Amino acid sequence: IDVIKEFLERSEAEKRYGVVLYQGGVPEGRIIRVVRIPGVDVEACGGTHLNNTSEIGKIKVVRGERIQDGVNRLIFVAGRERVEELEKREERRLKLIVEKLQEKFSIKNVEKDAGKTLQRIAKMFSVPLDKIEDTVEKFMRDIPKAERIEARNVIDACEKLFKEWKRSRKEKKRIPSELVEKILSDYSEDYKGYKLVFVPDPNISKDYDSIAIAEELARAERIVACIRDDKGLVFSASRDIEIDLREIARKTGSLLGGGGGGKERLARCGGSRLENIQKAMEEAKNLIKSQLSG
């Protein structure tokens, strides 16, 4: 289609085409440049334009962005070389994802349209396109080891991965009473009528959600718990104790090179310096005893 470019008096242009001319903004001056693709669009624009739409060559929409109500932005690449370069990058990314998935999934077929497949995966996991690889790796790490799962294609494998991950999360929150009893038996001490529970071994909670363990321990009376996991420390306290664990989490988190927070009776802390975890637990014990004594 030919792209028609002409200079018109503003009044004449508005008479012919109306305010649709100004979708991209209102230009200054009495004479305006009007760019028109017959049957498609017309705009007042002073920018660079082709003479015919065939000059664009190959074009590929990368993604869409919502700017405001009724206004959306399309992000795209144009030109054969740029599109082919993008498609090669997409194919490489999809190949890496397939290699990671094949650790636990037997994938029969790989989709031909890598770009579309990546977009569907991003939507499935509700993450940006550039976070897909990290997300798949995290989910793969979080699901339990099992026999390889059959999958029709990459999308099917990702759907099954998501379901397995959600099922695993639910399982980790079901804390067996035997584990609670073992923790209370092996890691608790009495202090001024309270029971303090400090679990220094992260392996105790590795198969379960450490926050769920802490909440389960706090169902007992007059108890404060501190549990170590692979991210830092989790704190909980029963409802019959006046204590603010948020402050304790913040102070111990600073020893780990990070921070902490949460609720008064359920908090956690963490950071990049987990080599200081033992020191942080000792500080936590002192802070807890101080609050209970005060």
Image (cartoon, helix red, strand yellow):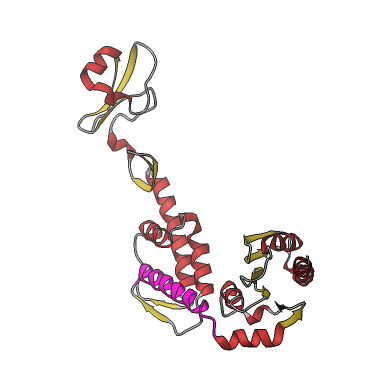
Query: Relative to 129, is 54 on the left or the right?
Result: left
Q: Residue at x 37, y 25 (%)?
A: 25
Please identify the quarter of the rendering in which residue 200 is found.
bottom right
Query: Relative to 97, is 265 on the left or the right?
Result: right
Q: Which quadrant would the C terminus be assigned to in this image?
A: bottom right
Q: Which quadrant would the N terminus be assigned to in this image?
A: top left
The one of 3 and 180 positioned closer to us in this rendering: 180
User: Mainly helix, strand or loop, the magenta region?
Assistant: helix
Please identify the quarter of the rendering in which residue 87 is found.
bottom left
Residues in magenta, as a range:
153-176
Residue 75 in sight from this viewpoint = no
Q: Position of residue 211 (x, y in %)?
A: 59, 72
The one of 8 and 276 positioned closer to us in this rendering: 276
Query: Relative to 253, is 131 on the left or the right?
Result: left
Q: Position of residue 158 (x, y in %)?
A: 41, 69
Query: Relative to 247, is 75 on the left or the right?
Result: left
- Magenta stretch: residue 222 in it? no
Q: Residue at x 65, y 81 (%)?
A: 203
Residue 247 in sight from this viewpoint = yes
Q: Residue at x 72, y 68 (%)?
A: 274
- Magenta stretch: residue 175 in it? yes
